[in-house]
Amino acid sequence: MSVPLYQAKAEMFRTLGHPVRIRVLELLQDGPRPVRDLLAEIDVEASNLSQQLAVLRRAGIVTSFRDGALVMYALSTPDVADLLAAGRRILGAVLTDRDGLLVELRAATPAMRRPTRS
Amino acid sequence: MSVPLYQAKAEMFRTLGHPVRIRVLELLQDGPRPVRDLLAEIDVEASNLSQQLAVLRRAGIVTSFRDGALVMYALSTPDVADLLAAGRRILGAVLTDRDGLLVELRAATPAMRRPTRS
DNA sequence: TTCGGAGTTGCAGAAATCTTCAACTGGCTC
DNA sequence: GAGCCAGTTGAAGATTTCTGCAACTCCGAA
């Protein structure tokens, strides 16, 4: 593969790096949904949502199809749900570490210089 | 936690959305490594690598500590490896779909807008 | 065929991110 | 201490991404 694989991986993660897109994916975990529904739940302008959906579509993470007058969206693969779950776990671990460490530090050495974290 | 959770999740994914940062994390999957090693394998300027490491550090995804004259980096939680693995699976699924089923999809759903690249 | 609802697209200004350079800190050895 | 090696930080210009507006397409109903 001549085009760096790291580039493709990074692009995939970057695609997920937007609050609206994350919300869309979480809503789609339960099955296909029309844009109407997404729009009703996400509090963003229609054009903006459409832009974000286009980003997800281009990346191949979701697919769209028409159902009568509505446009439906769905996850292109259930693996996406796994990714979101893994993300949740990391977030939990990181926040726990941060909060736990912070409390510990405050209790033990109130005036201590912070270690190697900015 | 008053700050929207979707924001935090999006930030976490965005943090991974950079080729150098992805490479760093993949290298750290095998255990802690000094910056020297990373620098030797990633072909990027020292200051740039340092910037990317700082991004990962701020996000709490990696931790750093000194070992004599060297600075070592390590994953802050093994969950990160799970996330990378899930990402690989999705990338595989998406690329397979694109290469293998594109023609079929185009023929089967004529009402759908063609999923053009970028 | 005309109308209105459902989405999409193009565009431009605003905001965030990336990269590089130069200057800096911290530790080790002489 | 002087000099060096390892790594970090700050800043600025270039690039990318985001958002909202207006205009557009497509479909179903009247």
Image (cartoon, coloured by chain):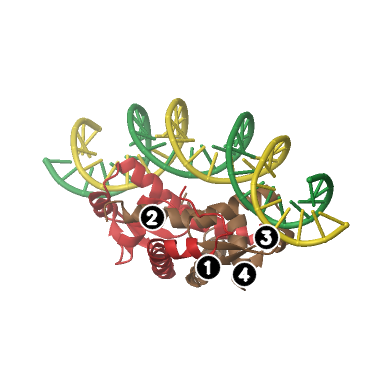
Chain colours: A brown, B red, C green, D yellow
Up/down of B40 relative to B25, above or below = above
Q: CA distance from mark 3 to mark 1?
A: 21 Å
Q: Which of disc 1 and disc 3 is earlier in sequence?
A: 3
Mark 3 nearby-residue class (10 Å; few <14, some 14–19, many ≥20): some
Name the element at disc 3: helix
- The answer to whether marks 3 and 1 sit on the same chain is yes
**Which residue in the protein does label 2 denote?**
A8
Up/down of B102 relative to B82, above or below = above
Amino acid type shown at disc 4: Pro
- Asked if residue A60 lies left or right of residue B9, the reply is left
Say which quarter of the image contains residue B82: bottom left
**Which residue in the protein does label 4 denote?**
A32
- Foreground mark, 4 or 1, reads 4
- Foreground mark, 3 or 1, reads 3
- Asked if residue A22 lies left or right of residue B51, the reply is right
- Residue at the location (26% across, 46% down)? B43
Q: Quadrant of the N terminus of chain A?
A: bottom left
Q: Which of disc 1 and disc 4 is earlier in sequence?
A: 4
Residue A80 horizontal/vertical position (percent): 50, 68
Q: Is residue A42 visible?
A: no
Q: Which of disc 2 and disc 3 is earlier in sequence?
A: 2
Q: CA distance from mark 4 to mark 2?
A: 26 Å
| Chain identifier of the residue bearing label 2 in the image | A
| Chain identifier of the residue bearing label 3 in the image | A
* Labels 3 & 1 near each other (Cβ < 8 A): no
- Residue at the location (40% across, 63% down)? B91
Up/down of B55 relative to B4, above or below = above
- The answer to whether marks 3 and 4 sit on the same chain is yes
Amino acid type shown at disc 3: Val
**Which residue in the protein does label 1 denote?**
A84
**Which residue in the protein does label 3 denote?**
A35
